[in-house]
Amino acid sequence: MPASLALVGNLDAQEEADYLAALAAAMPGETVRPFRDLSEAERATVEVAIVANPDPAEVARLPRLAWIHSLWAGVERLVRDLGSDAPPIVRLVDPELARTMAEAVLAWTYYLQRDMPAYRRQQEAGLWRQRPYRAPAETQVGLLGLGALGTAAAGRLVGAGFPVAAWTRSPPAGGGPPGVAVATGPDGLTRLLGGSDVVVCLLPLTAETRGLLDAGRFAAMKRGAALLNVARGAIVDTGALLAALDAGHLDHAVLDVFETEPLPATSPLWRHPGVTVLPHITGPTNPGSAAAVVAGNLRRYRETGRIPAAVDRGRGY
């Protein structure tokens, strides 16, 4: 029997039970136990930790740890908290997560394309007024980020008839998804922002992307454009965004992620008429599909001894 696997994280009781059940079903030949249930002797045998916002002190108490499998796609907090001496970190690359994220990007792009924020404001004002229809083909979407999630979102948007351009740090192999114009570099970013009716942020949070969408970048956006941020809150300068909305330069922002979560009750974003606040729901992790990904990676490790592709700490993802 292989050594126990440690589940280390800050999950509530129901979440933990759901993940333990899903992992057990996906890996009947393995034993996955919460960190707190392992004795010191058992912790000394753990080679792989499955983690969700873990306490770094608990991870440090696994002396034989060879690698860490995250249950989340975003790993910037994990990289920061565990430090440079931590074992390799493998992020969750889950096709089901990509599908649900792409579904949400399409849904909220429709929300913006069909002027739903304006109709909400009209309802609040008791105003009956039909607005001109704008077809998907007339609504340019600019994607920031073209990883697994961005590529999946691009496919859904193109399939729905939206013209799509994408900006990425480096040119993708093969030139990017079909039907998507790809830009790189600072000039490419400026051009994409200036030509997009809806800008969708799907970038990882790194030193280079923190605060990327600032006053200058909002000024570069097309007047009347909208922002959808489903990546990380710290990529957006909130004060600059509110200023661009108040000035009428941007029409609306749909925000699913924030620097502090839950979003504090005192945040002006809650009450701003140009902002739709979502409680980090666009890309939920599915325990069953996540467990299947973990199981596949662990099986290959058991068979070959090779650790799955890990996070590039220099890039931060």
Image (cartoon, helix red, strand yellow):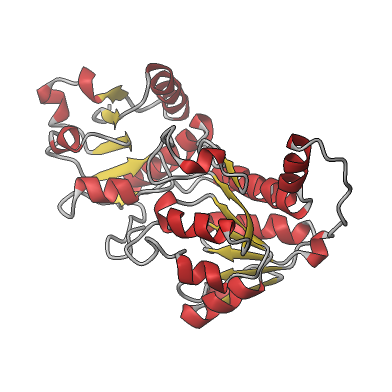
Residue 246 position, x and y percent, is 57, 56
Residue name at image x 51 percent, y 78 percent: 184
Give the number of callouts.
0
Q: Nearer the viewer, residue 110 or 6?
A: 110
Residue name at image x 33 percent, y 55 percent: 310
Specify the quadrant that holds the C terminus.
bottom left
Q: Nearer the viewer, residue 75 or 198?
A: 198
Residue 280 vs residue 307: left or right?
A: right
Residue name at image x 55 percent, y 39 percent: 271
Residue 223 position, x and y percent, is 66, 68
Q: Nearer the viewer, residue 242 or 194?
A: 242
Residue name at image x 26 percent, y 38 percent: 48
Residue 74 position, x and y percent, is 41, 48
Residue furthest out toward the bottom: 187
Specify the quadrant that holds the N terminus.
top left
Would residue 209 be seen by someone viewing this image from the given angle?
yes
Residue 88 position, x and y percent, is 26, 51
When asked about the image quadrant of residue 142, the answer is bottom right
Q: Nearer the viewer, residue 291 or 271?
A: 271
Would residue 168 be seen by someone viewing this image from the given angle?
no
When asked about the image quadrant of residue 315, the answer is bottom left
